[in-house]
Image (tube, rainbow, N blue to C red):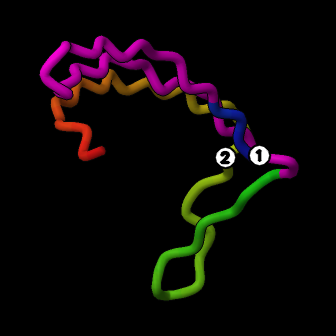
Amino acid sequence: MGVVSNLGYRWRSSRDTYINLGLLAGAAFTLKDEERFISDGSLYEEYDGVTIFAMIELSFGWDFR
């Protein structure tokens, strides 16, 4: 299961161009123990934890009206 949030701001110019700066951040966590198996069927690893992630977004564009 995961939870994600997206925050950002868009600056618009008078010539219909924009710059967008944002942050996408969240966490993914397991609801129960996960087991991973290798090809011969033996147990490789048990994992129960939280993965935190984040990404910065920078984009440029034009508005077509």
- The verdict on residue 6 being magenta is yes
Instruction: Single out the mark in the foreground, 1 or 2.
Output: 1
Residue at figure coordinates x 60%, y 66% from the top left = 36
Q: What's the magenta region? A: 5-32
Q: Is residue 18 above or below residue 43?
A: above
Numbered label attached to residue 13:
none
Numbered label attached to residue 30:
1
Residue at figure coordinates x 76%, y 48% from the top left = 1
Numbered label attached to residue 47:
2
Predominant secondary structure, magenta span: strand
Q: Quadrant of residue 8?
A: top left
- View extreme (bottom): residue: 40
Q: Position of residue 62 (x, y in %)?
A: 18, 37
- The verdict on residue 36 being magenta is no
**Label 1 vs label 2: CA separation?**
8 Å
Q: Quadrant of residue 35?
A: bottom right
Disc 1 and disc 2 in contact, CB within 8 angstroms = yes
Neighbours of disc 1 within 10 Å: few (<14), some (14-19), many (20+): few
Q: Position of residue 47 (x, y in %)?
A: 67, 46
The count of marks equals: 2
Residue at figure coordinates x 29%, y 21% from the top left = 20
Viewed as shown, does residue 29 lie left or right of 14? Answer: right
